Image (cartoon, grey):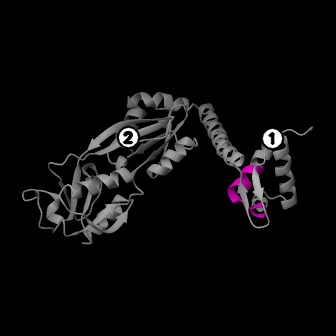
Amino acid sequence: MGYQLELRHFTYFLAVAEELHFRKAAERLFISQPGLSRQIKQMEEIIGAELFIRNKRNVSLTAAGVYLKKEITYIFNHIDFTIKQTKLIDKGSEGEVRIGFLGSAMQTVIPDFLIKSNKDFPKIQFSLEEMSNYDQVKAIVNDDLDIGFVRLARVPDGITIKRVQTDTFSLVLPKAHFLEKENFISVAQVATEHFVLFSSDYSSIYFDKIMSICEDQKFTPIVSHKSVHAQTIFKLVESGLGVAIVPTSLQYGFDLDVKFLEIPNIPQRAELSVIWKEDNRNPALEKVKMLMS
């Protein structure tokens, strides 16, 4: 067969793989549906593998198609980033490092990291995006991120994880609450109150630690609200809708009518870690990684 795979084949394949609908994919690509179908069929013949299962109602990926989609997504992301890096280097920059983070990392860890980086590597640029643990890991695997700041105990093979902060936990209360530093003994004193907690979507291990703090004091918290944002949690506490347990460092940077009481005599700690992909080839990342050793 005289046909060869071209970049357009992969573009067409990815559109169909994401839409799982030939008409919608064709509209997205601004080509005819029959033309798109021919291109996908041609691609399957060149590769020698069936990529889609087609019937009158549904389109789905074969096992080979699932694998190809994952790899092509990674390759396209890497190409886009490589082109962007090339443009930055041409303008005198040393490139860009893409950082994902949980909101709590923005209190001290990320500002300290950026100050050190800007001092040692002033020509490296940084982009930052607040993301969940899961989304950060997924983005790093897909080459959409270079560094993530997460609360995880384990990560997939091929990803390095290093602890960068160990924090205590504090109880968050409305300012008018009867508990103060002088009379605060344990979280058992608020066992009958409603709790506003970080959702397990924020970090399952973090959520489990908060639950264990309460369970160690022989009660299960009455959880009335959950959120992935500290600002929302503190606002709900300020409004009298419950109390919360958060890493102590989160008390900084908010101007709300709440108070923080560090929880004494507990073994639980809030651990923040940095992660990156071991085979990430971004030269800017290689430089800033030295600051996290």
Q: Residue furthest left?
A: 182
Q: Is residue 85 magenta?
A: no
Q: Which mark is residue 273?
A: 2
Horizontally, residue 70 falls left or right of residue 47, namely left
- Please state which amino acid type lies under the numbered disc 1: Ile
**Within-10-Å neighbours for mark 2: few <14, some 14–19, many 20+:** some
Quadrant where the C terminus lies?
top left
Asked if residue 71 shows in the view, the reply is yes
> Nearest the camera: 185 or 205?
205
Q: Residues within 10 Å of mark 1 (few under 14, many from 20)?
A: few
- Along the horizontal axis of the image, is 133 left or right of 59? left
Q: Tell me, yes or no, if residue 130 can be seen here.
A: no
Kind of residue indicated by mark 2: Ser
Q: Which residues are magenta?
A: 12-24
Q: Residue at x 29, y 52 (%)?
A: 209
Give the residue at mark 1.
Answer: 47
For the N terminus, which image quadrant? top right
First-in-chain label (1 vs 2): 1
Counting from the top left corner in percent of width and height, residue 27 is at: 78, 62
Image coords of residue 13 (percent x, y) = 75, 50
- Find numbered disc 1 in the image and state the secondary structure of the residue it sits on: helix
Q: Is residue 65 left or right of residue 280?
A: right
Indicate yes or no whether the magenta region holds residue 21.
Answer: yes
56 over 73 or under it: above or below: below
The residues bearing labels 1 and 2 have C-alpha atoms spaced at a distance of: 41 Å
Q: Which mark is residue 265?
A: none
For discs 1 and 2, the disc positioned in front in the rendered view: 1
Main SS class of the magenta portion in the image:
helix
